[in-house]
Amino acid sequence: MFNAPALDVAIGLTFLYLSLALMVTAANEWLAALLTLRGKTLTEGVGRLLDGDKPGPMTREFFRHPLVKSLSKGKRPPSYVPPRTFALVVKDMASRQQQHDMSDSGSEGLPAEASAKAGATGLPAEASAKAGAASASAAHLQKQFQTLALGLSPSDERSQAEILEEWFNDSMERASGWYKRQIQIVTVIVAAVLTILTNADTLRAAAILWANPTIRAAAVEQARVRAAMPLAEPPTIQAAYQNLNNPTPPTASRSSAEFVNPSTSPGTATEAESAATIDTSALSLFIGWSNTFRHFNDQYCAAKQRAVNASCGTSAPPNDACQAQIDDLAADARCELDGTRRVGRNVTPGWAIFGSPFIVLSLAAKHSVGWLLTIIAVSLGAPFWFDLLKRLVNVRGAGTKPTETAKKKAEA
Amino acid sequence: VKRILVALALVAAVPVLLDAGPVKFSNTFIELFKNRVTIDVSFTVDKSHSSPNTISDDGDDGDLHAAGRAPEVGLPMVVEIANARDAVQKAIVDKMKERVGKPASSLSGVWRIWYEHPSATVQEQFETVPVADSTNPKHVFEVHPVTSFAGISAHSSFIPIPGYSAYAATTAFPHYEALKLTVSRDADFTTMKSSTARYNYTEFDIVLSGAPADVVDGVMVLADVVDSAGVSIVAAARRMVCAAGTPPAETIRKAKSGAKFKVLGIPRVNLERVSALAVNDATVVLVGAYEMIIVGIVP
């Protein structure tokens, strides 16, 4: 058993970062849904494929297609379009464009080489070959098809659907990068708001944990329980078959490392959902505003008490003005009687705190470094902190519980 | 009195509402049986019904139940002979009753994992199995229906049960579809946990989604399950399994994709889907991880 205050402080801080990171994930999911970030990124990605720089008429036609519309909820764009659906819809659009062009006039051909390759693979390049009459979007799409066709070798045996799917997948990898950058910005903003709201000051939290063994023990115990739980609820999978003609498909075992990210797998419970199930009551012992509020209210109550003393003087019985001030102080929820003097309670002073800009600024200055450290830490994400927490808890407990395999090996 | 009755009803409902205890299956066993319909074991009969179930609409299906142990299974288990009230099955029924408490006899039949009578505690495959103290001990493993026992065949029992009204497909399949199987896998075991499952015998219509495939001991095919209007009542095609040498296997084997049948079937956990979708050193929840044992083709 390895037990040291420094390790316990590290466990407490890691538990703090994990808890905040899970809350940030929950907020991110909510904001991403509210702002339709996934749908917008997908629209932008498809727009670049079909229209060029930004979504245009081809993109609008794509998202109006019944196959894509069926993936949408209301008027919002879908969050995800399967590559197969993309290929089917683009082929359908190209085929309709071809019919439209044929009915207009005779078509111009593609450059000979591209045309030959496109013909060989069945790519719908010729569908939008009437460059002169085509819109800018159709011309862009035609150019994309030509590029795809020229990039093929004569021995390429992929079907046109496979080529379109690959084209879509390549583009979606870029779109996924845009989304990650967007969500990273949201993460930092949400982490900052949450850190300040909870006054999760790393330096202050570390100091409290270091100085107080009782708080440290409470934090370590809750961290230990949390580390024993999975990071997220297990994902739910529909046990469907891919090939309906093969009821006994060969299977390869899957490891957790290669498994899909549960947070992006549809119909699964996520880290965000599991955030609500953690007992984090120990955190309130080393983060939060209660001490600051008490200190602020202390000053406020002392000032009020001084005003009462000045008004009442030493005369007895008190006059009406004096009595009114005494009653007002007694009724003030921010103050309480401690022996013979009024002291501040650890309740929020409300907007009153903003009435003292100096105090707000001094608070910000006092906590800024600690907040910054917390924001950076929380931005690293829940999986990082969960992994670290498990390691630290294992180190504290001097190693993990042996698995069945290990036990059997030992017995053998 | 009303309050007492409500309290008693709640107490009675608790075992149904609670999740069953997890069962740890050997990974080797799963890989061996995931694409097999049946299992051959050396079965010691601990307890047997003295006579087959009666046949009625409320679940009495005319089966003969017996409980016992088999080293090939390594779990508390029950075996059931279908259509046991049929005079044709008298010999095998009598043999089962005769072998109670005697040395093991060879038994073959359709293996079945189903969380209908699960234990509240963890069961681990190939740990010591206690002698059954009733014909229905806490179990998730069955051989049901039996195809042969002590050299006596019961292949002819794979027909609809005369006079029995099975559960309607529109009642049973929504339940099967909603069942969640929580699966975790480590190097040696796959642990499966489910809420208590119901509805043994179901009569339903299938439309074959693909071509039937022969396996070593029967036939398997993926099929859509539809209601009387032909509308699918399952989220995806489900696997149907038929034991070799039984009337359903002979009929389904010759069928083509798109063929329609009305069948009598019982559900079991689909070990092939479990094997395919379980994740090493992690937990997943599977829905639709069941398959149907075709017990009879309804004319």
Image (cartoon, grey):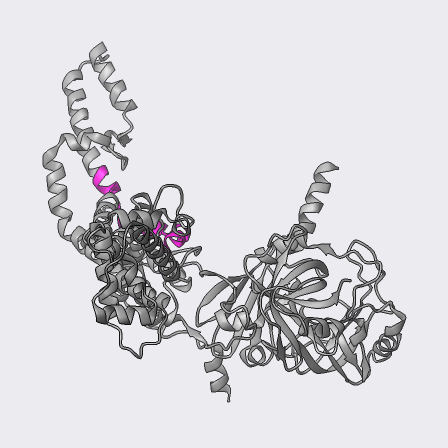
Q: Which residues are magenta?
A: A271-293
A287 is within the stretch colored magenta: yes
**How far across and down, in percent of the image, does residue B226 sit?**
63, 56
Q: Nearer the viewer, residue A226 or B23?
A: B23
Q: Which quarter of the rendered picture does the N terminus of chain A lie within?
A: bottom left
- Camera sees residue A15: yes
**How far across and down, in percent of the image, does residue A211 sit?**
23, 56
Secondary structure predominantly adopted by residues drawn in magenta: helix
Q: Nearer the viewer, residue A24 or B15?
A: A24
Residue extending furthest toward the bottom: A412
Q: Nearer the viewer, residue A396 or A228?
A: A228
Q: Relative to B68, is A233 above or below? A: above
- Left or right: where A96 falls relative to A295: right
Report the residue at 61% width, 55% height from top: B18
Residue B254 location, quadrant: bottom right
- Left or right: where B2 falls relative to B279: right
Report the residue at 23% width, 59% height from top: A108
**How far across and down, in percent of the image, does residue A310 sit?**
14, 19
Report the residue at 39% width, 74% height from top: A400
Report the residue at 13% width, 44% height from top: A364
**How far across and down, in percent of the image, does residue A207 sit?**
21, 55
